[in-house]
Image: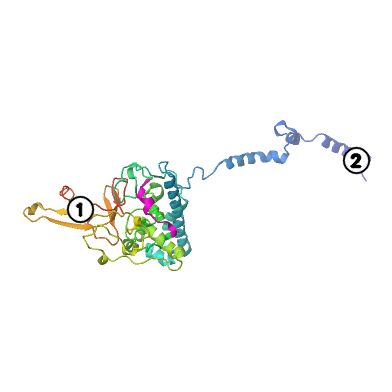
Amino acid sequence: MLSKTVCATIAGLASVAVAAPAAGYSAVTHDEDHMGQSWVERFAAPGRAQQNVVDQYSWNSGMTRAYPIHQSCNATETALLEQAFAEMAVLAAHARDHILRFGNSSSFYTKYFGKANTGEPAGWLDKIVNGDKSGVLFRCDDIDGNCWQDGWAGHWRGENATDETVICEMSYTSRWPLAGLCGYGYTVAAEKTTAYFASDLMHRVYHTDKIGEGVVGHYADTYEECLQLAKDSPEEAVRNSATLTYFALDVYAYDIAVPGQGCTGEPVPEEEDDHSHDSATSTSSSMSASPTASMTSSSMESTSTADAATTATSAESAEATEASSTTSAEVECHTHDGGEVHCVEESGSDEADSTATAASAQETESSSTTTAGAECHTHANGEEHCV
């Protein structure tokens, strides 16, 4: 049994502890700098301050999610562009998702990309949807003075501004909405990718450094060329802008527009081209059901086609009878790096030897004229590319 003295001592020590808390604890609960804080709050304060700094950091601060539209575009043009960009995102996102779902087991995938790995095309498609658009600009003011030319629906500004694109007036009157995919007699194989505003813009955004990075480009242009590229150079097919666009249209048509059926169609055989030299208008046979007069060309690029009169003269045969030939061709042109003009013919029109015409332009400038519906843009090195 404890003595009364021991009990008194213990009681006294307890009263002292209660009356005079430890100096450190007193500082925690009564220090002026921490008035109202518990000791737990005080020791947690440095970590909380660090958390406040972390809260102020945002990894995606300054990111531009929507494609910027220049103030030169009026209300109507802006509305149509915004709708087209939204449809482009839907088109690209589904193409990406098709790859993620089926990989290279998809017959569509192997058709367009051969034996290539799936990561690269899926990434390029996703970049259209989720990539940062800062610095990219679409404008309507024809700053480079190209929209006046027949058939020009727009162009990439090239070395003038590698992330800027001009959309000409013709785009707003000749492009179809994505909801109409597989309508109007359209088939993927027979018509060009520019028929729909969404797919046309896919080609255009890949020209920009921000989205295409100077890697996505023109390795093949026509439907048949793209299929051949998949067999010969799948490593190029996965970064070919036309291939990515054809693939997106084909799988969207099959999976979404007309489920399980699509509208792939067949390319127009060369022997079925119209070789008549009497008519200045050429329309694709599969587009004959076009609902509007402004969309009678197979790509709706232009309804303006003309006889391309070329007079061939030779210095070695000065006494020979002057020969002339007339062809009717509807083409789209744009410029590649280095100044090379790249023209792709419309389906259903006479073959036009644009290379020969360019080579003889200096010799027959006074006697040779060529008028053709073309869509052209200029690459960074001044090369003009027409599709």
Which marked residue is nearer to the observer: mark 2 or mark 1?
1
Determine whether 227 is above or below 356 in the image: below
Between 290 and 240, the residue placed more toward the observer is 290
Which residue is painted at 17% across and 57% down in the image?
325
Q: Quadrant of residue 302?
A: bottom left
Query: How far is disc 2 from disc 1 in space, using C-alphas?
Result: 118 Å
Q: Position of residue 188 (x, y in %)?
A: 37, 63
| Disc on res. 357 | 1
Of helix, strand and loop, which one carries label 2? helix
Q: Quadrant of the C terminus?
A: bottom left
Find disc 2 in the rendering and name its residue. Answer: 7
Which residue is painted at 68% across and 39% down in the image?
43
Q: Position of residue 308 (x, y in %)?
A: 21, 54
Is 236 inside the magenta-drawn segment? Answer: no
In the rendered structure, which segment of residues is drawn in magenta? 165-179
Amino acid marked by disc 2: Cys
Determine whether 9 is above or below 111 in the image: above
Q: Position of residue 359 (x, y in %)?
A: 19, 51
Between 133 and 284, the residue placed more toward the observer is 284
Labels 2 & 1 near each other (Cβ < 8 A): no
Residue that extends furthest to the bottom in the rendered view of this protein: 260
Q: Quadrant of residue 49?
A: top right
| Disc on res. 146 | none
Sequence order check, earlier mark of 2 and 1: 2
User: Is residue 335 among what the camera can see?
Assistant: no
Of helix, strand and loop, which one carries label 1? helix
Amino acid marked by disc 1: Thr
